[in-house]
Image (cartoon, grey):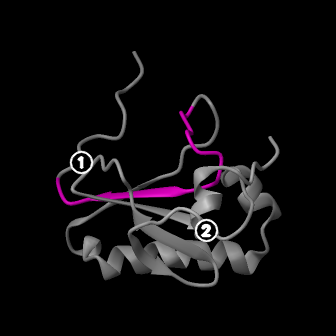
């Protein structure tokens, strides 16, 4: 799938849409989700035109990949999520219900999150 630079996260990166920023560096931008699914729900997006984990890990320079994942850890520590635990989720593609076609990671925390998914019958 080709990257669409009109997606909402591309617009946030360009400053066309505001966000409640938590963290930013050369590799990533982190901000609070506008429809949180946990008491703390932060999105972390890379600063590049990547649709999914697949093309990000395939096409991004190693420095960008490492910097992005370091940013996730930095955000979790900055918000105190490391003290009680947190979950990171990255949906890739239609079957995983990826809604915005710009690679992003959700960080959930602030309550007991329960099991990931139900076991297959």
Q: Is-magenta flag for residue 110?
A: yes
Q: Residues within 10 Å of mark 2 (few under 14, many from 20)?
A: some
* Secondary-structure class at tag 2: helix
State the count of labels: 2
Q: Is residue 13 left or right of residue 121?
A: right
Q: Is residue 24 visible?
A: yes
Residue 56 figure quarter: bottom right
Q: Which residues are magenta?
A: 96-111
Residue pushed farthest left?
111
Residue occupying the point 53% across, 33% down: 97
Q: Quadrant of the C terminus?
A: top left
Q: Which residue is mark 1?
A: 113
Q: Is residue 70 left or right of residue 112?
A: right
Image position of 5 with respect to 79: above or below: above
Closest to the camera, between mark 1 and mark 2, is 2
The dot on residue 23 is: none
- Give the percent coordinates (x, y) of residue 62: 75, 76
Secondary structure mostly seen in magenta is loop
């Amino acid at each position: 799938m080709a990257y669409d630079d009109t997606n909402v996260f591309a617009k946030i990166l360009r400053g066309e849409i505001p966000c409640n920023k938590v963290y930013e560096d050369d590799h990533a931008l982190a901000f609070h989700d506008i429809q949180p699914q946990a008491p703390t729900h932060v999105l972390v997006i890379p600063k590049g035109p990547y649709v999914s984990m697949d093309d990000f890990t395939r096409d991004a320079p190693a420095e960008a990949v490492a910097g992005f994942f370091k940013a996730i850890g930095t955000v979790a520590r900055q918000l105190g999520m490391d003290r009680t635990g947190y979950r990171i989720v990255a949906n890739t593609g239609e079957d995983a219900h990826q809604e915005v076609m710009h690679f992003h990671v959700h960080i959930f925390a602030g309550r007991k999150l329960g099991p990931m998914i139900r076991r297959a019958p």
